[in-house]
């Protein structure tokens, strides 16, 4: 494990990753705050290094020139930022091209960047580790589609298993006789025969082409939350959108929002591969992972304790601490609301509800530095769309609805259509009750953990009972506490019993 990263892991640090793929060359700068991983810079060039690989066995000359230009710029950025650690990895095109080694040597000579060429097995492994870094409870098969290859890896109980690499990238499927759906379906099915051992219910899709397919589906479904990470398509939905894409002309695809001209060239191939995977693996659903090889390389470099931390809780802690004021308030809130949690409607199950309540408490001070006239809308939007992994879209909506209630927002929330589409009635009630409980605790104590320990809340006999330690009743159980307590009690269908 890199000692430089180990020695700096407790303090915020930058890490750089350059991914030299068959289709794109990308630089990502990450800021690490423990297990919280933030993307602070992301730039890519669709160079198409592997465009000519199937026909010539060599890298595209034009693509190599574009890639080298991009890598010179990336090297300059890295020199300016001076990250604590830099990963430079190349995948299928450089690995398989007869001039791949010469390309690496030229890059080293002209930029100083030393490229690590990943084997097919390593590429599959790091893609799966990237999935696990962003979705720790993933269970199924990861599928990383690049320009020249497809990597499949079994994920079982949060552990990445064996993987296989297959020649199923768009450039590997390119046919000199043109794009013929029927002929290509047969080719895909033939090349997927070794994938039999990877049958699963859930496929975790990694790669830009599949992220674009997800965005296309969002547009057609009028989905309200435009975040691809952990976006879920049922197999039938994925099959339908794949067939629509594969039958559409390039000109039609270029007219769709979010589809670039270069992506329109490769998207129909990706659609056919996805369709083939659904049939071959017997898939029931596809979960999009925005995290892949780059994040897998980074995840492997973390120390064991940091890697084992919950990325949702770590992300909420980092976000809340950056905007909030009291570092001890989240823990005090989470302890104080425990008796109330048992009376709340179940949203996702006891364990997950407790985890989400913990996350919400870490966000409870998020609006401290925001203008009070706009606080509700700003915190709601920030929580709903925060780049924090390890949460489903429904859980994002739940947290946003809870923080909306914590700051006195109406039950409808700033985006009622989004919330109503992603949450059922019980989940909406649960989120609101949790937010009102946090609001009660914060306003009762003035957000002071020292004062909060002198008050108690419990649910008994159909009532929300609020009590205070001796001598603290007049201080803590005043009119504002009565109003906040009644709002919470009403949301739970309880009476308020204020024992002053």
Image (tube, rainbow, N blue to C red):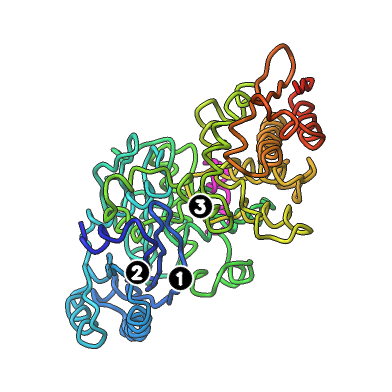
Report if the CB atoms under discs 1 and 3 are less than 8 Å apart.
no
Contact, mark 3 vs mark 2 (Cβ under 8 Å) = no
Residues packed near mark 3 inside 10 Å, few (<14), some (14 to 19) or many (20 plus): many
Q: Secondary structure at mark 3?
A: loop
How crowded pointer 2 is (Cα within 10 Å; few <14, some 14-19, many 20+) is rated as many
Q: Of tags 1 and 3, which is closer to the observer?
A: 3
Residue bounds of the magenta highlight: 231-246
- The residue under the point 32% across, 53% down is 299
Report helix, strand or loop for mark 2: strand
Q: Earlier in the sequence, mark 3 or mark 2?
A: 2
In the rendered image, residue 176, in percent from the top left (x then y), is placed at 37, 72
Whether 65 is drawn above or below 429: the answer is below
Q: Are marks 1 and 2 in contact (CB under 8 Å)?
A: no
- Mark 1–mark 3 Cα distance, whole angstroms, equals 16 Å
- The residue at which mark 3 appears reads as 388
Give the Cα separation between the discs numbered 1 and 2.
Answer: 10 Å
Q: Which residue is mark 1?
A: 42
């Amino acid at each position: 494990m890199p000692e430089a990263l180990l020695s700096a892991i407790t303090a915020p640090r930058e890490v750089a990753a350059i991914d030299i793929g068959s289709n794109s060359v990308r630089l990502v700068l990450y800021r690490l705050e423990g297990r919280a991983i933030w993307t602070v810079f992301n730039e890519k060039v669709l160079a198409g290094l592997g465009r000519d690989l199937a026909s010539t066995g060599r890298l595209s000359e034009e693509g190599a020139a574009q890639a080298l230009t991009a890598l010179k710029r990336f090297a300059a950025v890295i020199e300016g930022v001076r990250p604590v650690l830099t990963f430079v990895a190349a995948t299928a095109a450089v690995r398989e091209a007869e001039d791949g080694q010469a390309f690496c040597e030229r890059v080293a000579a002209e930029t100083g960047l030393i490229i690590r060429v990943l084997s097919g097995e390593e590429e599959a492994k790091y893609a799966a580790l990237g999935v696990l870094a962003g979705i720790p409870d993933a269970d199924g098969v990861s599928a990383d589609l690049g320009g020249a290859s497809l990597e499949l890896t079994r994920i079982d109980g949060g552990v990445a298993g064996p993987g296989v690499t297959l020649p199923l990238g768009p450039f590997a499927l390119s046919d000199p006789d043109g794009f013929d759906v029927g002929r290509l379906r047969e080719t895909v099915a033939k090349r997927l025969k070794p994938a039999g051992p990877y049958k699963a219910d859930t496929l975790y899709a990694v790669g830009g082409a599949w992220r674009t397919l997800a965005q296309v589906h969002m547009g057609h479904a009028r989905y309200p939350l435009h975040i691809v990470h952990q976006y879920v398509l049922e197999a039938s939905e994925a099959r339908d959108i794949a067939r629509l894409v594969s039958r559409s002309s390039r000109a039609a695809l270029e007219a769709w929002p979010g589809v670039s001209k270069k992506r329109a060239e490769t998207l129909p191939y990706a659609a056919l591969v996805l369709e083939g995977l659904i049939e071959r693996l017997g898939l029931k659903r596809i979960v999009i992972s925005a995290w892949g090889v780059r994040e897998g390389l980074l995840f492997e470099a973390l120390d064991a304790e940091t890697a084992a931390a919950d990325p949702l809780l770590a992300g909420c802690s980092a976000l809340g601490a950056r905007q909030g004021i009291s570092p001890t308030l989240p823990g005090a809130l989470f302890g104080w609301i425990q008796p109330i949690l048992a009376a709340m409607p179940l949203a996702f199950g006891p364990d997950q509800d407790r985890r989400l309540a913990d996350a919400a408490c870490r966000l409870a001070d998020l609006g401290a530095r925001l203008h009070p006239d706009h606080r509700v809308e700003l915190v709601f939007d920030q929580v709903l769309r925060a780049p924090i992994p390890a949460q489903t879209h429904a859980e994002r909506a739940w947290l946003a609805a809870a923080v909306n209630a914590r700051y006195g927002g109406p039950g409808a929330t700033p985006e009622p259509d989004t919330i109503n589409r992603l949450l059922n009635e019980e989940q909406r009630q649960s989120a609101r009750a949790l937010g009102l409980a946090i609001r009660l605790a914060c306003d009762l104590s003035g957000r002071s953990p020292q004062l909060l320990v002198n008050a108690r809340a419990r649910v008994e006999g159909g009532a929300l009972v609020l009590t205070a330690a001796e001598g603290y009743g007049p201080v803590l159980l005043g009119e504002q506490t009565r109003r906040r307590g009644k709002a919470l009690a009403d949301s739970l269908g309880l009476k308020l019993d204020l024992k002053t």
